[in-house]
Amino acid sequence: MNTTPLRTPSTQPGSRDDGDVGSGETWPELYADTGRFKPARSLQFRNVDGTAAPFRDRVVHHALINVIEAPIDRSFIHDSYACRVGKGVHRAVDRYQGWARRYRYVLKLDVARYFPSIDHDILKEKIRRHLKDRPTLELIDTIIDSSPGYPESPRYFPGDDLFTPIVRRAGIPIGNLTSQFFANLYLDAFDHFVKERLGAKAYLRYVDDMVLLDNDKGRLSELRDAIGARLQLDRLRLHPRKAEIMPVRVGVDVLGYRVFPNHRLLRNDNGHRFARKLRRYADGYGAGRLNFADFDPSVQSWLGHARHADTRGLRRTIFRAIPFRRGAGQTATSA
């Protein structure tokens, strides 16, 4: 499928609308003397399995996604929910809960080390099935090739020789917008395999988290084996400790919620973690180090997430236990 080539906006030197991010670089300068985009060094985070591109690169990533998202997104299955317009966590949880009222058992799956395992050559091949514009493909290749290496033990797949895991490059930064989109695309053919070849009627995926439901535990066990074998074609493996079958009635952890057929709760660690954060905000506010505007977006974000579960009592308990006082009668927000 042909796509509109990616173009950079024309700019005047010194313009504040030319992509300047404080380093003196304009849009044309991002492409240097060769006319090709040159990625800057990615930002590394300690104790976090991933990296994020610097701001100037993220501008290019967003421009790229604006061009390629629509023609590729049309190929995705309906029940792929990550980083897509009109989808997201809450739609995925709603979909699962509807199925939980119809089916008795659920199989939860997770790909082991997903982002560090995405094979560059396979990813490029998948992208070329959708896009034909050469400058756009060259830019995508540059972004993929600039991914930092991940220190992984060699992992062998059928057909590999001794050096295959060493010479094949793998891994994309989890913090980049392009990586989130590429992660969806990487498993798109797999999604169609599960739906169309395996005939799974109740299947959804959010990045590398997969959920399948059925009334037959044996059928789910067969699906698990078939899925594990199919993932190896993309040089991926299921997480060995995250591939369990359980009754839906016991409540299943789905994307941050514990979901039952007819109600849902927040996971316990979520509520405890937010209460600790709110206590820090209250301490900072009481000491005069923080104003409401400093933490209200974070609080509102958690409330928006919590309101998608049966949490009215939890919200009241947390906010009543943690007063915000620098003057009498003030509260942080409404639960």
Image (cartoon, rainbow, N blue to C red):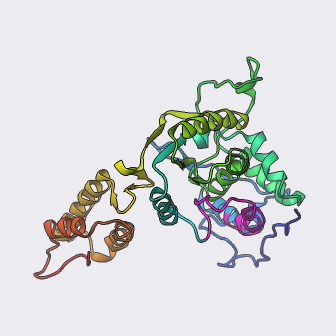
Quadrant location of the C terminus?
bottom left
Check the image and name the residue furthest to the top: 162
In the image, 75 versus 46, the foreground residue is 75
Residue at 23% x, 60% y is 280
Residue 221 seen: yes
Where is residue 102 drawn, in percent x and y?
Answer: 48, 57
Residue at 47% x, 44% y is 48
**Horizontal side of residue 279 vs 121, given as left or right:** left
Q: Which residues are magenta?
A: 62-85
* Quarter of image, res 288: bottom left
In the image, 205 versus 14, the foreground residue is 205
Quadrant location of the N terminus?
bottom right
In the image, 282 versus 82, the foreground residue is 82
Residue at 23% x, 64% y is 314
Q: Is residue 216 above or below residue 283?
A: above
Where is residue 143 drawn, in percent x and y?
Answer: 72, 51
Q: Give the total number of marks visible in the rendering.
A: 0
Q: Is residue 137 above or below residue 293?
A: above
Where is residue 124 drawn, in percent x and y?
Answer: 79, 47
Residue 111 seen: no
